[in-house]
Amino acid sequence: MAGLWWPRGKGAWARFAFTAFGVAVGVTVLMLCLTAQSALQGRSDRSAWQYTRADTPGTGSVRWLAVTDHFHGEQVLRIHVVAGPDSPSPGFPLPRAGEVVASPAMQRLFASTPDDQLDDRFPGEVTGTIPVDLLSHPEQLIAVVGGEVPGMFTAAGIATSPDHAFFAFARIIVGIAALVLLVPVAVFVVMASRIAAAQRERRLAALRLVGATRSQTAAIAAVESGIAALAGTFAGWLAYEGLRRVLASSVTYEGFPFHAADVRAPLAALVLVPLLAVLVSVFPLRRNASKLPTAVRALPLAVGIGGLFLVTYTSAAGFDELAALFVISTVVGALVVGPWVCLQVGRLLARARSATTALAARRIEHDPKASFRAASALVFAAFAATYLSGLVSAYGDLPGTGIPPGVVTVFDGRDREIVSDGTMADEERIRTREAIASPNAIINTRREFVLRERRLWDDVESAVHFAVTIVVVVAGCGVAAGAAGGVLERRRSFALLRASGTTLGQLRRVVVLETGVPLVAMTGLGVALGVLTLVATKGPLPTPGFAAVVASGLAVALLVAATPLAVLERASGIDAIRPGTSA
């Protein structure tokens, strides 16, 4: 029985390698997508103690006051404590009066900054270091100062769980983003698992003819795909383990990286991609002929875009209430119109006089839904990324704030504005002087608002660029997997073409067009719809940097999609012209 599912021969090993590679890519991307929530959760859990409140439960007592401070625009957390004999510990000894315990980054800042600009806000001698594991990120600026100051409260304990109102909403947003990224991954795994499906199905049908039961052939198909899936899962897990550490140090949130230990995904997710590969092999996709898509598919998109134009550029009564419906219609229409666009592209290519272009065009025309399927995620991803990138570009270099440049605002019961000499050093001296006079004062300058907003939008823009790159490249892998399966299933047709005088170079151009045209068309469609939606809503256009990201991602995707060329020469050899070879 083992000989029926273990790969034998170069063709079988090629199918095994393609399936394993597809599963490896799927596992890697799936695991990386699922690390976002863990990273946010880890950052919140580590810093929970910093948000102790008067109603925090516990069995001891501690006097506490946390003040959000700033230096050169960077957020600095200053915590004043008075610890008693029964005071709880946040994970390190609390300082006594005249002592300061600071994070490593804070201590480096103390050593490089004049006292009247920073150090004097933290009266005492640094006697200890806050462990990095208790910081929200490795470079957090925080110091705990011992001694009584006005405004302190008594807490029964120190907080052990995060208390952020925004956290649930952030998890929902991250979850939705992960689902959007997983759509092309699922498509890719399906395409990779279906490579040479026709040969497999004929082999299993032959086994049925000689007496194998349906359950036996299903078991053979499942084990055959399962072995490749396990190999791909192991390779994907190794890639994930290496890449998650790179992400922890290079991807930022609020301007700062993550702890490597927080960027992790549940290992249970490792079974999802292999399970999908096995299910695809056991329950093969039906290949029933379907009707060609018609122009009716463009109707939801026309209604959505047209409605947005009406809402934005006219004062017609009643349309404002339909704005949400128009947005939904636009998003749905962007996906529904894809097969029809592929059909039109195929018909346009068919007009070319080149024989190779005509062959590729007929392939796209014959089944535009299949041509669209592998690149379907690109439409929505490019559409959403283009629109978000336009919104990010609206931010500009200087966000609005009510604080004029060079002014320090102090809120301590005697709310006032203090004008500096315009230098950063003078602003910090004023802040230090006011913090000494009133430790619980809220002191703001324009600088921290500007830096915070810049970092927020930089994070959004980086996330958009990262997502669109992942989607484009994975979609390219999906197209490549589908094309490889198509090449293997059309071995006899390609061999007959070569025997009749078609050169290998011409066949290669056919395959390149079959794989590259859907990628370019769907990416272009998504970007065009995103730009059109921005115009319809009077939004700004994306920056040139976004165009560079899309172009570079598409170039990589096209290179990946061209990988089936490696098997074309052997697949179209003269030995493929024999009875039983697929047409």
Image (cartoon, helix red, strand yellow):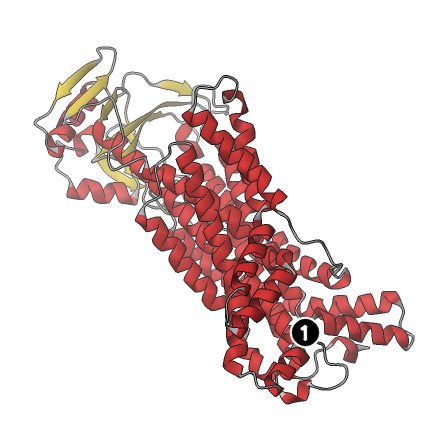
Q: Which residue is mark 1?
A: 489
Could you tell whether 512 is left or right of 15 in the image? left
x 53%, y 34%: residue? 304
x 71%, y 53%: residue? 291
Residue 567 in which image quadrant: bottom right
Neighbour tally class for label 1: few under 14, some 14-19, many 20 plus, Cα within 10 Å:
many
**Residue 179 placement (x, y as % from top left):** 57, 45
Could you tell whether 256 is left or right of 352 in the image? left
* Residue 73 appears in the rendering: yes
**Residue 9 placement (x, y as % from top left):** 68, 84
Q: Nearer the viewer, residue 26 or 487?
A: 487
**Residue 444 placement (x, y as % from top left):** 24, 24
Q: Nearer the viewer, residue 228 or 300?
A: 300
Q: Nearer the viewer, residue 399 or 191?
A: 191
Could you tell whether 461 is left or right of 339 in the image? left
Residue 289 in which image quadrant: bottom right
Identify which amino acid the numbered label 1 is placed on.
Glu
* Residue 159 appears in the rendering: no
Dot 1: what SS? helix
**Residue 442 placement (x, y as % from top left):** 27, 21
Quarter of the image with the N terminus is bottom right
Q: Residue furthest top?
A: 414
x 54%, y 54%: residue? 31
- How many numbered tags mark residues here? 1
x 51%, y 41%: residue? 174
Q: Residue furthest left?
A: 421
Placement of 375 over or under 161, stated as above or below: below
Quarter of the image with the C terminus is bottom right
